[in-house]
Image (cartoon, rainbow, N blue to C red):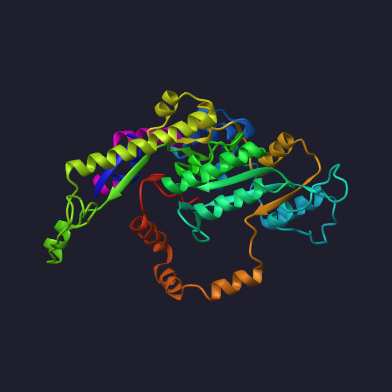
Amino acid sequence: PEVIRHGKFKSAVEPFILDKMSPENKEQTLTFVGSIWNHINEGISRQRKISTELLNQYADSMKIRNAQAAVTYKLIDALKYKDEVMDEMKGLVKTNKKKDLNFISLNKYTKAPKTGNKKGFARDKIAVIYASGDIVSGTGNNDEIGSDKLAKTIHEAWTDSTIKAIVLRVNSPGGSALASEVIWRESTLAKKAKPLIVSMGDVAASGGYYISCAADSVIANPNTITGSIGVFGLLFNAKKFMNDKLGITSDGVGTNKYSDFGSITRPLNSAEKEVIQQEIENVYDVFITHVSEGRKISKEKVDEIGQGRVWSGVNAKELSLVDSYGGLQTAIEIAARKAKTDNYRVIDLPRQKDTFQQIMDEISGDVDDVMIKKELGTDYSYYMQMKKCLTMKGIQARLPFVFDIN
């Protein structure tokens, strides 16, 4: 690997150059993991009336080994069979114990219309634009944020007079710096026209933060992973592998000194590394400038908390990288207040395909990919990550790891 990066915490490249975590990577990981643990610990402490010190003792001594231990140490109230729980619930809703309870799914519950003061058909709209996946140039696919496609969606939203505010729902570990810049530009234009609120999901880091920082307000959860303000470039020198392992040599001619710049058949020379390093520095400077202007923080401060360092939502709020805690609904309510409308309807963009079209797309999809997924099983995600690494182009603003949240 030929690694060029800015930011001592930009650890995405470490698996290629080290056999263990760097001290900086350990420091940043312990910081945000510790922040998430403290948030969880304090929440349990408040709800269960147990001190955080005692909870830490339970964790360190493995006290909570089974359900009975959870009762003994007051983490749960009782042990009951399902039928006993059902009887208790019937008592709470005053239903005859001989009758069955009616249940609805959480998904249906969350989609139930809210009662309020809204009258008749609401002409005003608040657009929720979903940006989920790796950030790539072009249109992308269903699992990616295509810069052209998302920029077009944002453009259509801010030029639509019936849309009074935009909520950008970001769930991304980042990706192409150039693609992120394209999306950022359209976001700044949208912000000039109407309120733009960012709602962060599980992860909105690196390029995910790049496309978020221009918003009027940034909303995250305490456990959101964000920050990672830094960039890197990664090329591969396969000369030794091809020569020694495959017995393949290469030769060629070029019209100019650097005609084969970036070839995998030779290492980068010092002049080439310097050129790439300068471009990395330029992109990083643009990145922290955007954050500085969007968040009203000095560039020096952004650089200090940047360097590719990953933060939790709690850390990010303390550092003014986000404004407040909340989910998507909170962001929608803030957008409505900023747009000065209390009678509105929410629309989702880009518009989703109907169920029949989705089924037909799946049927006509890549059969080879389906077979690989079936063959690899749980290892399929590793295959996909390697595949993405091989198709990365240009300078990357990307999180140093992949989250699989269960």
Residue at 33% over, 58% down:
390
Which residue of the protein is positioned furthest toward the right in this rendering? 119
Looking at the image, which is closer to me, 155 or 36? 155
Image spot of residue 47 (x, y percent): 64, 34
Q: In this view, does 129 lie to the left or right of 212?
A: right
The magenta segment is 15-33
Residue 176: x and y, percent?
42, 49
Frontmost residue, 124 versus 337: 124
* x and y percentages locating residue 100 in the rendered image: 79, 61
Closest to the observer: 175 or 284?
A: 284
Residue at the image position 24 percent from the left and 50 percent from the top = 1
Examine the rendering and report whether any part of residue 150 can be seen.
yes
Q: How many labels does the image show?
A: 0
Main secondary structure type of the part rendered in magenta = helix
Q: In this view, does 224 lie above or below 403?
A: above
Image x and y of residue 386, in percent: 35, 58
Q: Is residue 126 left or right of residue 291?
A: right
Image: 333 above or below 112: above
Q: Residue most toward the front?
A: 255
User: Residue 324 magenta-drawn?
Assistant: no
Determine whether, in the image, residue 51 is placed left or right of residue 165: left
In the image shown, does 362 or 294 lie closer to the viewer?
294
Q: Quadrant of residue 40?
A: top right
The quarter of the picture where residue 32 lies is top left
